[in-house]
Image (spheres, grey):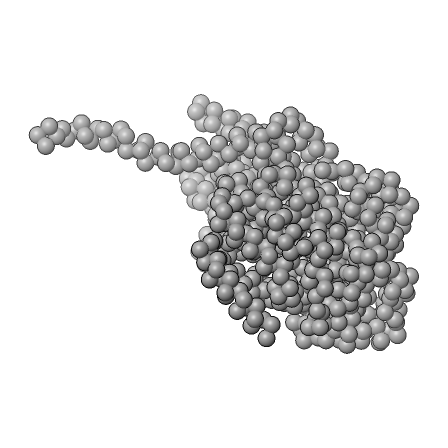
Amino acid sequence: MQALRMTLCAATMAVAFAANAAEVEVLHWWTSGGEAKAAAELKKMLEAKGHKWKDFAVAGGAGENAMTALKTRVVSGNAPTAAQIKGPAIQEWGDEGVLASIDDVAKKEGWDKLLPPVVSNVMKYKGSYVAVPVNVHRVNWLWVNPELLKKANAKVPTTIDEFFATAEALKKAGIQPVAYGGQPWQDATVFESVVLGVGGADFYKKSLVQLDQNTLKSATMVKALETYKRIKPYTDKNAPGREWNLATAMVINGKAAMQFMGDWAKGEFLAAGKVPGKDFLCVPAPGTANAYTFNIDSFAMFKLPNKDAEKGEKDFASAVMSPQFQEVFNLNKGSIPVRSGMNMAKFDACGQESAKDFQATNKKGTLQPSMAHGMAVHSATQGAIYDVVSQFWNDDKMTAKQAADKLAAAAKVQ
Amino acid sequence: MTSYNGPAQYGFAERWLPRLVLAPSFLLTLVFVYGFILWNGYLSFTTSRLLPNYEWAGLAQYTTLFANERWWVAVKNLFIFGSLFIGGAMAVGIFLAVLLDQKVRQEGALRTLYLYPMALSFIVTGTAWKWMLNPGLGLEKLVQDWGFTNFTFDWLVNPDMSIYTVVIAGIWQSSGFVMALFLAGLRGIDDSIIKAAQIDGASLPRIYWKIVLPALRPVFFSTLMILAHIAIKSFDLVMALTGGGPGFSSDVPATFMYSTAFTRGQMGVGAASAMMMLMTVAAIVVPYLYSELRGSRNG
């Protein structure tokens, strides 16, 4: 009923604004099933406002291809209305002087109140909103196959020590404890969850967000690195190069018991017809129940040549932040809405827990941007950290102390 | 029409037509190859990050590049891969060509068989070999299933050996092509020379080693040029086979350049690494070209 009312309302607005119709071109890489459905929803909403939607979808490479296409367009002076850009990359694009402010929309709709400050800071360049957030993925999850744990008589781990106890029990029972994909970004994903578990949110923030040299070289970091490496004997030999979804499939099919991965993994479980809480469990990565590393997709807004186009841009921003889109999109994508005060009834248990923890950790100050997913540091620094973490994981001759020193050196790469 | 002058018109066309027809491709090459080389060269001296800019940075990007451990791994890998790939593909290709040159039956079919890998793109080759070399899926599992349970072949997932898997796949892909080039060369050699050598009592290996192969110097030259540039710009094979991994152990300069310039927002460093690749090619090719071209002019 409410959807109908919204549509009617939008239709009336469409008549009112028909004179100001603009073409809204959006670069994104939502091309897979659920994501494409969500993008179509956005298109419908904008068309209801009388704008013309021009799809600029570039598939593949987790957005790498899209970024290359975007650079070409921006360099040739023909920027799209908005593009899927996230994290500190928004600042990098801001530095290039190509982003437009959408402060008036944000003020009117009170975004400052709807978004946690750690999130809104990411969306702002020099104090004004240049980007609009779409969703929140939690990165510090551990995905568990409860049936295998039962077989090994092990319990779901909540602390690091319990995790290794469970892993040992599984190994003894002849079950592979951890499904692992050996790609640099996955290495970094697991690593940051371990850092968060070993050192806590403050330590995580100091080391991987603020890149404090002394913290990176500290004994706690060495311990985190050692803990991270302790996971390796519980993975299989074929892990190098494995895609994350193949690792998830191992947990789904009962070939391995646990996986560290963000909540996009949930989509794989659901697609396989598994029920959260029964066939699979989502628990915070060991030792990180009180913290939350987020990965937020967002659209950055580009400077446009005329007023009509700017109107389209603002309507687009407002549509993305609307409760209606936030719900539809996130139900399809497996993430949770970024704006507060949403009704989470339609979401599954994992989504509801994620939303609850998102608000709770925001109050506690343990809500932190994910380094591995380009939310915390510049892409050059992130790449350098990836290199160290991956090398440490793969090279059995490197000590944790050496790796910590290398991390500190990588943090200086700008 | 009375002033129409046949022969002069013909002369004009003859003089200008080739230039006119060549002009577009000449122009395109000038802009898109040499122009962009210069542009890239300039970018490598700027502070370019996400997008190109023109703020002069001197040699800062090169300093950053040379301080990067991953770059040196990539350079080392290029030399390992380059030398083994060129040497291996040459050796296997020549060997196959000599065997096929022995007037074997069904030569046409065999030739096609060996040449087929060349018809595949490196992406396909890389993916196929990735599966074959995967310890849990391919060769190692096969041999273990046969009963040799101690057999291990885990180069693909071993950071110390991963670059050699790229060599294997590269040789598999390119040796058929080398074979075709040399076979064509072998067929061009005058039979009477070989017969004369046979009469003098030379053994077959000796004939090939001392007479036939030295006569194939131009074929060597062109094969080397082709293989060398495949080796230096190799990107797709590495991406498909190992993805530069495990870690960055099988990174090569081309994949390094791609990730710095396009995914890590370090376009200046990427440009600098591309210049280093260009200079590596130039350092190998220019002296060789020079000596070859001068040699042929004198001879």
Q: Is residue A97 above or below residue A295?
A: above
Total marks placed = 0
Q: Is residue A329 left or right of residue A236?
A: left
Q: Position of residue B275 (x, y in %)?
A: 59, 32
Q: Position of residue B156 (x, y in %)?
A: 70, 54
Residue occupying the far top of the picture: B298
- In this view of the protein, which residue sits in the foreground, A20 or A195? A20
Task: Decide if residue A172 is in sight here.
Answer: no
* Identity of the residue drawn at 78% across and 65% down: A356
Dividing the image into 4 quarters, which one contains the C terminus of chain B?
Answer: top left
- In this view of the protein, which residue sits in the foreground, A209 or B225? A209
Dividing the image into 4 quarters, which one contains the N terminus of chain B?
Answer: top left
Q: Is residue A314 above or below residue A164?
A: above
* Identity of the residue drawn at 87% across and 53% down: A200
Q: Position of residue B44 (x, y in %)?
A: 61, 31
- In this view of the protein, which residue sits in the foreground, A222 or A168? A222
* Identity of the residue drawn at 59% across and 64% down: A38
Q: Determine which quarter of the picture holds residue B210.
A: top right
Q: Position of residue A52 (x, y in %)?
A: 47, 57
- In this view of the protein, which residue sits in the foreground, A110 or A34? A110
* Identity of the residue drawn at 56% across and 56% down: A316
Q: Is residue B220 left or right of residue A191?
A: left
Q: Is residue B3 left or right of residue B149?
A: left
